[in-house]
Amino acid sequence: MSLNLASTSLLIVDDTPENIDLMISVLSLPGLQILAANSGERALALAERKQPDLILLDVMMPGIDGFETCRRLKAQPSTADIPVIFVTALGEDVARGFEAGGADYIAKPVRADEVRARVHHHLERRRLMRELTALNAQLEQRVQDRTKELIQVNRQLREEVNERRFMQDRLSYLATHDFVTRLYNRDALEEQTMRLLSDSQRPEDGACLVLLELARFRIVNEACGYIAGDELLRQVADMLAALCQPDDFIARLGGDRFALLCRRTPDSVMALAQRIKGVFEGFEFVWDGRAYRIDARLAVIPVHRDFVSFDQLMTKADEAAYLVRRDGGPSVRLHQVPAQVADARESVNWAYRLMDALKNHHFRIYFQRIHGLTERAQPGLRFETLVRLWDPESQRVVQPASFIGPAERYQLIDQIDRWMLREVLSRLSGLVPVMAQLGQVSINLSAYSLRDPGLADHVLGLLQSFQFPPDKLCIEITESEAIVNLSAAKGFMDALKLHGVRFALDDFGTGFASFGYLKQLPFDAVKIDGAFVRDMDTDHANAAMVASMVQMAQALALPVVAEFVERQALAEQLRELGVTYAQGFVFHRPEEMTEAALMAAAATPALP
């Protein structure tokens, strides 16, 4: 049945005109009125005034991003019930979009058929909701008006009630099922899980959650297109339905992730997981005459009584999935969660802890000075900023080694990076005497943040907002296996270097790709990892490695910074090798970046 789009409006929000034009060309349907906004602020105003039936919302925008725009829409009674579809190129944005109140998402690059199908789906759901509301009001009025004529109108009334029941059933189905696979969706899984957790009669070991991730799904999506990807997901859904028992609850979480909620013992569910894994080992997806081998990773999480919420259980499931991916290759893993899950002393829930820290400003900024060793050293105050976590319960500072890994695992590191950038530039820009002496401030960004296509514009916006000289900012990028897209990293660096921002390769020498990065990415300096520097005066092998790194950097005309310089003898040895700068306890122990500490540092000569 075709959808009547008369008096129907759609709001497209994107800061790129070309993207808006593309969406308009795809969605130019008879009767559909299309509105456009190029910012979150403009979208909020248009939505309030025009009351569109559906909003397509880009994630990365200057000013307020898509997530904040969605949260504000949902906070206003007049726009709270307008469905929002996020348009994003990043898979990790999906979960954040649903948390912000989004109803669906469209992956970039967009496909015309998918865009039309999803827009049609949500407009139909919107129409049914409005008709249902109007029909309910109409029926109630008719019941009052026709009480005396009940016998005569009874048949007609029954037909109308049946019609309302049909629409309610249809609306319920759309709200609880996945669009592609027709399996239950994440919302339905949450409702089913909460029923399970509230069941006081279930045995202690009588339920498990299975998290399944497809291996090599992206190959099919990218090689054959999204239509083939959707067909693969439907085949996987049919396969799972055939293997599971009738009372097992099967849901698609989004992307290539599925979940099974089974009211059975871990041994029984592990046997099911092994059967699923065995079927995948012989499974081939055929498209256009070509066969693709698709495998799966499965994590089985026993549902203990200590779990009190769906979010808590999914946090542990995400942790289990991360461990399976880290182990490499498709596999099945039983993830045993310690007893007393809710007890923070027994099992620290880093996801909640880090989110609370961002919300309540529990992060602290420390700094450590960088001293010049040779005549190549530039004058001025130079230091690296360091992030710390304040634990209000224990009243102590938590070191980065404890929380950076969980922050990356739970995809919160980009928020911490953005907090650091804003706080450092804001505090320094307000201290005129410090800015007068400042040569360079270094901020370390996680490789995960570099995947954000809007990060460069965000940094430039902060520099302009705080009137911070770009050439005084150095962004340190840690050598990490997480940098899987060198072209994206180069694009980020090139965009900022045009304005004068500098870059340093941090922890140089810890991986096989360091020398490749130096050739392909426009770094301005290298920082030798402290593991090689700390004992190079007693370890001849480390001394030789440091010497070779310095020679390579000098051949590329790049200054060298040595970390973890804890003795004066090391400083002298590094100076003889030609190392330009040194950083370590022998010069300065990290201290909190307060106004008094910065003023004292600015008053101290920059070179020893």
Image (spheres, grey):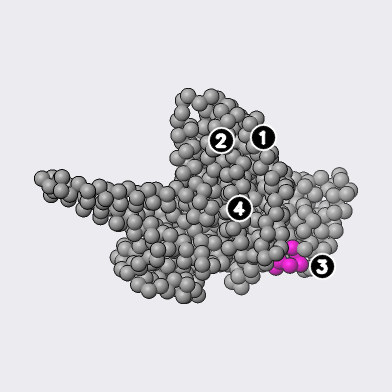
Q: Position of residue 75 (x, y in %)?
A: 35, 52
Q: Give the residue at mark 1.
A: 271
Q: Give the residue at mark 3.
A: 555
| Image position of 60 with respect to 539: above or below | below
Q: Amino acid at mark 3?
A: Ala
| Image position of 257 with respect to 300: above or below | below
Q: Counting other residues with Cα less than 10 Å from the Cα at mark 2, is it few (<14), some (14-19), or many (20 or more)?
A: many
Q: Who comes first in sequence, dot 3 or dot 4?
A: 4
What label does residue 262 carry, if any?
2
Q: Who comes first in sequence, dot 2 or dot 3?
A: 2
- The residue positioned 51% from the left and 51% from the top of the image is 182
Q: Position of residue 162 (x, y in %)?
A: 30, 48
Q: Disc 1 on helix, strand or loop?
A: helix
Q: Position of residue 139 (x, y in %)?
A: 21, 50
Q: Residue furthest right?
A: 540
Q: Who comes first in sequence, dot 1 or dot 3?
A: 1
Q: Does the magenta-highlighted stretch encompass residue 8?
A: no
Q: Amino acid at mark 1?
A: Ala
Could you give the CA–CA distance between mark 4 and mark 2, rounded to whole angstroms? 21 Å
Q: Nearer the viewer, mark 2 or mark 3?
A: 2
**Observer able to see residue 246:** yes
Q: Give the residue at mark 4.
A: 235
Could you give the CA–CA distance between mark 1 and mark 4, rounded to whole angstroms? 21 Å
Quadrant of the rendering where the N terminus is positioned: bottom left
Q: Nearer the viewer, mark 1 or mark 4?
A: 4
Q: Disc 3 on helix, strand or loop?
A: helix
Could you give the CA–CA distance between mark 2 and mark 3, rounded to whole angstroms? 61 Å
- The residue positioned 39% from the left and 61% from the top of the image is 123
Q: Which residues are magenta?
A: 517-522
